[in-house]
């Protein structure tokens, strides 16, 4: 049983639901309060102990690579103005040399294809997969909670973060079947992509956090195209589940689908309210704004 050291972050999407904001800026760089969306996800992975961040990028995503690099002109200006707080903030967010890798997904062929594009960088070891469209606000990193499950199982296994959704919305998500409990987690008996309400095995949806074994790359290598003409990760996981156990963790925390406008706005509000420096003032401003409406 190998430890989880690497994380894949697929950032090649076009962000069409946020046009025109994403015409020239990657959606992953949209700010949630004062930190880019991708930085929040990297922070979560880092808290869980991830050592190597693998970004699967596409065209016009160079600004993401720049964000995780030093900006000498900016640092020089801050140093000349004695802005130590800002300098320390930049230093704290900067990964160490060699901790980031970037590889291209040349065609938009789906999440499964994006994961497969990172196969050489991951190698023959288990890895975490974090979707930057999803933010999880939790007291303890969602991925850290999943790591604890992975370590407690004590054998090569796969872990998926899940959360309850209203039964009338199960047709919008990947849904899992619930088997016997194993500590805080449970065995996943089946995975169904966007089932009807009557066919859904539960109301637990797959959230954008995974721990996967490297055998998934072998399956993705010959995975045919599924829904939407894309190589679907869920299809590959269903095949892998015939060989290896999958566990679901109903994590402690709240997820936000920042791929949608409503989810993105809700994340900004939730993260702002949780901040000690701006939360009280923002709460008062929000209360006043709502009363005027």
Image: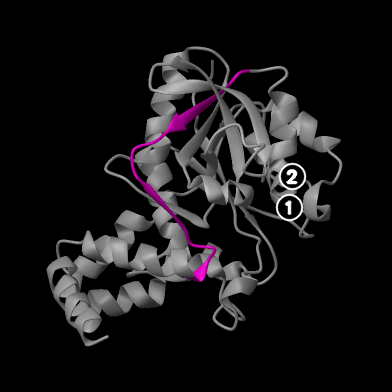
In magenta, the rendered stretch is: 245-261
Quadrant in the rendering for residue 267? bottom left
Relative to 239, is 187 on the left or the right?
Answer: left
Tell me what residue is drawn at x 83 percent, y 54 percent. 229
Relative to 255, is 159 on the left or the right?
Answer: right
Tell me what residue is drawn at x 60 percent, y 72 percent. 17
Q: Is residue 254 magenta?
A: yes
Quadrant in the rendering for residue 195? top right
- Find disc 2 in the rendering and name its residue: 232
Closer to us: 185 or 87:
185
**Numbered circle sitting on residue 110:** 1
Residue 88 rendering spot, x and y as whole percentages: 24, 61
Q: Is residue 114 above or below residue 25?
A: above
Quarter holding the C terminus is: bottom left
Farthest bottom residue? 292
Tell me what residue is drawn at x 49 percent, y 24 percent. 3
């Amino acid at each position: 049983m190998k430890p989880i050291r690497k994380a894949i972050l697929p950032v090649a999407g076009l962000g069409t639901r946020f046009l025109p904001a994403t015409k020239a800026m990657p959606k992953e760089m949209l700010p949630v309060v004062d930190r880019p969306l991708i930085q929040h996800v990297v922070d979560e992975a880092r808290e869980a102990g991830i050592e190597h961040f693998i970004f699967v990028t596409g065209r016009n995503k160079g600004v993401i690579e720049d964000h995780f690099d030093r900006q000498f002109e900016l640092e020089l200006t801050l140093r000349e103005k004695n802005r130590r707080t800002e300098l320390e903030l930049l230093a704290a967010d900067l990964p160490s040399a060699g901790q980031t890798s970037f590889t291209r997904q040349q065609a938009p062929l789906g999440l499964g294809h994006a994961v497969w594009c990172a196969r050489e960088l991951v190698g023959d070891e288990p890895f975490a997969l974090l979707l930057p469209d999803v933010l999880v606000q939790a007291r303890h990193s969602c991925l850290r909670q999943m790591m604890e499950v992975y370590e407690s199982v004590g054998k090569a296994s796969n872990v998926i973060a899940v959360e309850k959704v209203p039964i009338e919305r199960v047709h919008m998500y990947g849904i899992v079947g619930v088997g016997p409990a194993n500590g805080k987690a449970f065995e996943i008996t089946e995975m169904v992509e966007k089932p009807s309400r009557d066919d859904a095995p539960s109301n637990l949806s797959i959230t954008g956090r995974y721990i996967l074994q490297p055998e998934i790359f072998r399956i993705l290598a010959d995975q045919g195209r599924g829904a939407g003409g894309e190589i679907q990760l869920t299809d590959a996981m269903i095949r892998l589940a015939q060989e290896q156990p999958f566990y679901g963790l109903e994590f402690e925390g709240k997820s936000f689908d920042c791929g949608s406008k409503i989810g993105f706005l809700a994340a900004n509000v939730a993260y702002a309210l949780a901040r000690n420096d701006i939360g009280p003032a923002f709460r008062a401003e929000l209360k006043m704004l709502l009363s005027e409406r």
